[in-house]
Amino acid sequence: MEIMLASASPRRRELLALTGWHFSVCASPIPESAHPGEAPQELAKRLALAKAESARNSCPDTAMILAADTMVIHKGAILGKPADDVEAAAMLQGLRAEQHEVITAIAIQGEDGASTLELCESKVPMRDYQDEEIQTYVEGGSPLDKAGAYGIQDPDFTPVDPDAFHDCFANVMGLPLCHLVRAMQRLGHDTPEDVPARCMQFTGYQCTIYPEVLRGER
């Protein structure tokens, strides 16, 4: 089985590689504006489906397309990628010592055009980092290609409170692997690897929720 990943995200490529499935990459950009009154969950699902459909139309033929859309939501507002260092610093200051949500929708489209969807939602508590830490992190350039201006995996900043976070680490990176595994299993495709074990080894995060996710309980 060959998967076409409809995403230019290097983090999604790293995570998908942990599954052992063979894949190639072909991203096809789409407009990402919200419809009036559209809930973030519905927006994420619509965009994931649109990305899969766009890749189907513009990328090389493949049996399966995988697309995803991740959103950072704080106090009802969707935080995209910051436009510049000033906006990145403002986002990080707003998130500091507070909890927000990260939502990822996964769309898998088969050769016949039929799609299956998964939605993962994680609560993300941020630690009370200092202004000097924000400045150093922003000057390093990492926040500019990340929604919410941070990466949970960035070791030099570690913005998330590790003692208070109890959700899906891979979701906050952009691809909730256990949700992907259960979606693929519904389509009759088992992974050749122990995905929870590989994910925990890769991230260094000891996940406690993966059995519930794989059983479809959350």
Image (cartoon, grey):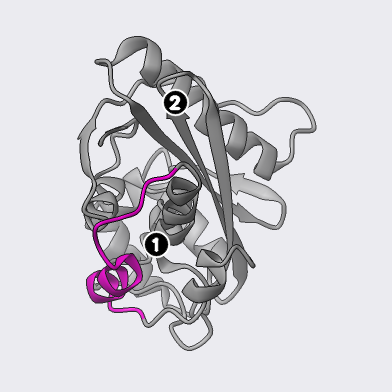
Q: Amino acid at mark 2?
A: Ala
In which quadrant will I find the N terminus?
top left
Indicate the quadrant where residue 213 lies.
Answer: bottom right
Q: Residue 170, percent across and down? A: 39, 62
Q: Which residue is mark 2?
A: 52
Q: Are marks 2 and 1 in contact (CB under 8 Å)?
A: no
Q: How many marks?
A: 2
Indicate the quadrant where residue 154 lies.
Answer: bottom left
Q: Amino acid at mark 1?
A: Ala
Q: Residue 188, percent across and down? A: 43, 45
| Viewer-closest of 173 and 161 | 173
- The residue shown at (27%, 16%) is 61
Which range is magenta?
A: 188-205
Taking 13 as reference, is 135 left or right? right
Q: Is residue 204 above or below residue 19?
A: below
Q: Which residue is mark 1?
A: 170
**Residue 146 forms part of the magenta stretch:** no
Indicate the quadrant where residue 212 lies.
Answer: bottom right
User: Which tag, 2 or 1, sits closer to the chain's start?
Assistant: 2
- The residue shown at (53%, 30%) is 115
Q: Is residue 177 above or below residue 112?
A: below
